[in-house]
Amino acid sequence: MIRRLDHHEIDFEKYTECIEKSVQKNMYARREILDFWCESWDILVWKDYEYVMPLPLTKKFSQKFVTCPIFCQQLGIFGSEDSIEINGRFLSYMQANLDIYLYSFNAGNHFQRDLSFRKNYFIPSGSFADQKRIFSKGRKSAIKSATHLNFDLTVLDAAILEFINRFYKGLSKEKDKKMLLDYLQFLHSKEMLKVCSASLHGELRTVALMADDGETLYLIGLVSDEKFRIENPTSFIIDQILQHHLEKRNFSFMGSNVRNIEIFNKSFGAELKEYPVIQHSKKEVLIQFLKNKLS
């Protein structure tokens, strides 16, 4: 029932139709996103594209490994419903036939077997006024203290790029930062990039970077000049984004297991959406690779 198709064998019309009609639909599984991020990628397919599962691949030691790229948060199994039985078959096939370093399923995939989980926080589209009622008391206070700031929907210009270069945190390697900047340019070329800023007298405090697939805003990063932290620009900018867009867009915080970031996300009344992951250490991957070579 499950077949693995190499990239050149994929019927992309059927693949795209399955993704677009799936109950698990998200931006990360779109062909153009995977083409941008992956060295190569294949799929697992159930019957005639009733369910599909993208497999991002990277090559190490002349061997291909499954690993989800940076900024590609949730992949997994996509289909007309969430079937624990079918999910289990995909999982079994994957574990029996593939070398896995890191694979993230999506929050709509459920399994009988226990897997590890990562956290994402999500706000479904709807009334901003109703959503703001469930902001935490502390978050409401922080937003109120920041009303002197200016909010703008802006573009990826030289000033924004310089600000990102100076203040973006979380990427220790220069090559990863370059990949982020290339990704922003790619999203801009696809008309999928939203850039918002909080400023005062023309001086940037915080920049929000988001991908927009027409249904959901995915927060790629909140970039802030920490010397203005006391002004609460991050609280202000998220409040403004939700106020401007929540009626027509879901909002995904992109998740974090860092406690302070988790508290920040929850304080906007966001729902916890855990997603299953398979992750092996480099040592475990190497051992499995050597076993495969010797068998």
Image (cartoon, rainbow, N blue to C red):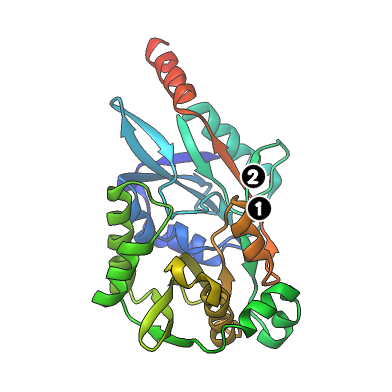
Q: Residue at x 44, y 62 (%)?
A: 16
Rendered position, 66 above or below 287: below
Residue named by callout 2 = 117
Rendered position, 156 above or below 264: below
Nearest the viewer among 195 and 99 is 195
Nearest the viewer among 110 and 14 is 110
Q: Residue 126 sits in which quadrant?
A: bottom right
Residue named by callout 1 = 274
**Cβ–Cβ under 8 Å for marks 2 and 1:** yes
Amino acid, disc 1: Glu
Neighbour class for label 1 at 10 Å: few (<14), some, many (≥20)? some
In the structure shown, which secondary structural element does the residue marked by tag 2 occupy? strand
Amino acid, disc 2: Phe
The image position of residue 103, as x and y in percent, is: 51, 42
Neighbour class for label 2 at 10 Å: few (<14), some, many (≥20)? some
Which of the image's four quarters has the N terminus?
A: top right
Q: Is residue 221 left or right of residue 276?
A: left
The image position of residue 255, as x and y in percent, is: 57, 57
Q: Is residue 124 left or right of residue 21?
A: right
Q: Is residue 263 left or right of residue 45?
A: right
Nearest the viewer among 66 and 70 is 70
The image position of residue 82, as x and y in percent, is: 67, 54
